[in-house]
Amino acid sequence: MDTLYIKKRLALIDFTKAYYDNYEELLSSKEFKTFLGAFLDDLKKSDPVLYTWLERFGEREAIIEHLIITLKYLTVISYDETTSLNKHEIPIMLNIVEKAYNFWRDLHRFSIIYSKEDNGLLMSRFIASDVAFNELIISFYRLCEEKLQGHRNFVYRQLQAGTNAALFLSRAKTALPEKYDVLAKVPFVTKVMMRSPMIIHLDHNKRLGTFLETKSDPLGKGQYRDFICYPILVGECLTFVYFHKDFMASAIGLANLFEFAPPELWHKKPDCIILFGVKDNKKDTVYYHDVENDIYVGKISYQPIIEYFGYFKKMALTLHNLVMMRRGYLPIHGAMLEIRLKDGKTRGVCLMGDSGAGKSETIEAMNKIAELIEAQVVIFDDMGVMYVKDGEVYAKGTEIGAFVRLDDLDSSAMYRDIDRSIFFNPGNNNSRVITPASPYSVVIAPHKVDIFLYANNYDDKKGLRVIDDLNEVKDIYVRGKRFALGTTNEVGISETYFANPFGPMQEKERCDVLIDKVLKACKESNVKLGEIYTNLGLKDKGEGGIIDAARALIDLIKES
């Protein structure tokens, strides 16, 4: 990888190859020339008048040299000596400095430190190096700005001027079979440092299509030179996510959503492998079961649209669900809470439904009626599994965070965890936030299910309905009906097998057996079944229907 790699809105800086301790080193580096070149390319399109003014100094390379000389001059002259500059050029140069600084800050900026071994010294300097770089950039900008405006600032804002996040990479010794040697040189993420809240703006914010099985091994050969591996635990499934560096801005979301798989687990054979952004001139979103090694391999071809984080998340969950179904667990596309009322009653509540049904929104609505609730623990926010043990139904989750639509959240929910959150395309359609939800130890622990409801977002009814007829319950759950809100390529009323296109839809026969087993156990152990009316698919969202649903759920907990 280049020391400074800039593509579209992404900037990757390899501190292993170059680091800057002062202004002179920064301005004299080839990386600074790379940055100015990218800035001028952008300026030529965004402000052609200003770019035309710069052309008086010559071609592109000559402009870069002139800017570097001017900036070096600003770092050494005193405030009194700024009068020696061309008076007509000063306001224009100030404008250029501001635009260059804003261009830099508009990039998604990541630093990398790489060590072939687990170098303790480098590891200890990992965060310190990035912090120092942030201070260098912001002090350099302020110095140039103040020299050009002729006085010091009156207000100072401590912005994230260096990077948005830093990654420590190292070589990994894995237990991957020999056929996966093509991945052997891909470095693993060992540590991550994020400056949150992090705001990511991408050109695409919607997932299209589904993940289909292929009978051909998608691994290929020699395509992983520019890849990085982020090891995660999806529920109990060890998953190695190999992604192309161009998708770093989305991949960083993995840190907030899934538990990081520590190095001591890398020596075990993974349950799943994801190959994200493979340059094979295809448009694949496929998975393959390596039966010989019992590893599920997902592959997503390199294409602009996959920069949407949903592709990372849903591929990981699809592979997890396929693994867990083979182990006898029923995947649930839904949300689960353990709710303790102030009268001491505690119940495990699971809400099932496809994207946009109102699962996460109902969880947030529960916070609005906190006068009735003593404690509320999120077990899973999007995907979990159910299983039967000793005649009782239990569930456990997959994610330590929540990937939630901002459009349907109360504003207080957004601000409550803003200091730890990653925002994707705020202000646009299908804006999302990833925020930590529950510790991993809580997520994977067994939790008894007392209430299991389908989230109905399309009927204009209020509250919820308990259903005793098991056949009617299964019909509702398996049909997976909802009003699609445009979070995928679906719009309007749609139906998805068991509301779960991430594994169950691909292996219906295996899943159907598990559905019958779990629903039968629910009936025999007096788990409340039925549907809850979220109203989110209605034009006016049911005039507070989500709150009515939350209150009805509290009443059901009281009665059960």
Image (cartoon, rainbow, N blue to C red):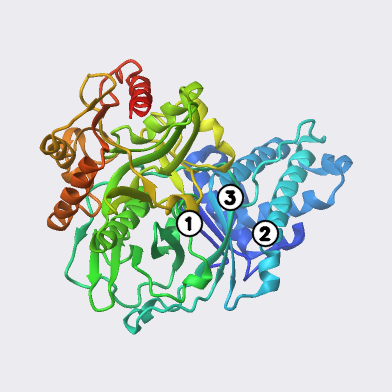
> What kind of residue is marked 3?
Asn
Residue underneath mark 1: 259
Residue 330 vertical position relative to residue 155 in the rendered view, above or below: below
* Residue density around tag 1, few if under 14, some if 14–19, many if 20 or more, within 10 Å: many
Q: Where is residue 159 in the image (x, y as percent from the top left)?
A: 66, 41
- Quadrant that contains the C terminus: top left
Task: Mark 3 or mark 2: name the one nearer the start of the chain.
Answer: 2
Q: Which three-letter amino acid code belongs to the residue tagged 2?
A: Ile
For this rendering, which residue is in front, 240 or 479?
479
**Image position, residue 219 (x, y; %):** 29, 73
As drawn, the label of residue 127 is: 2
Residue 60: tell me if it is visible: yes
Amino acid type indicated by mark 1: Glu
Q: Name the residue under label 3.
A: 164
Residue 308 visible: no
Residue 76 is left or right of residue 165, and the answer is right
Q: Quadrant of residue 407?
A: top left
Question: Which residue sits at x=32%, y=32%?
Answer: 358
Q: Nearer the viewer, residue 277 or 355?
A: 355
Q: Badge 2, how many Cα within 10 Å: few under 14, some, many 20+?
A: many
The residue lying furthest to the bottom in this view is: 178
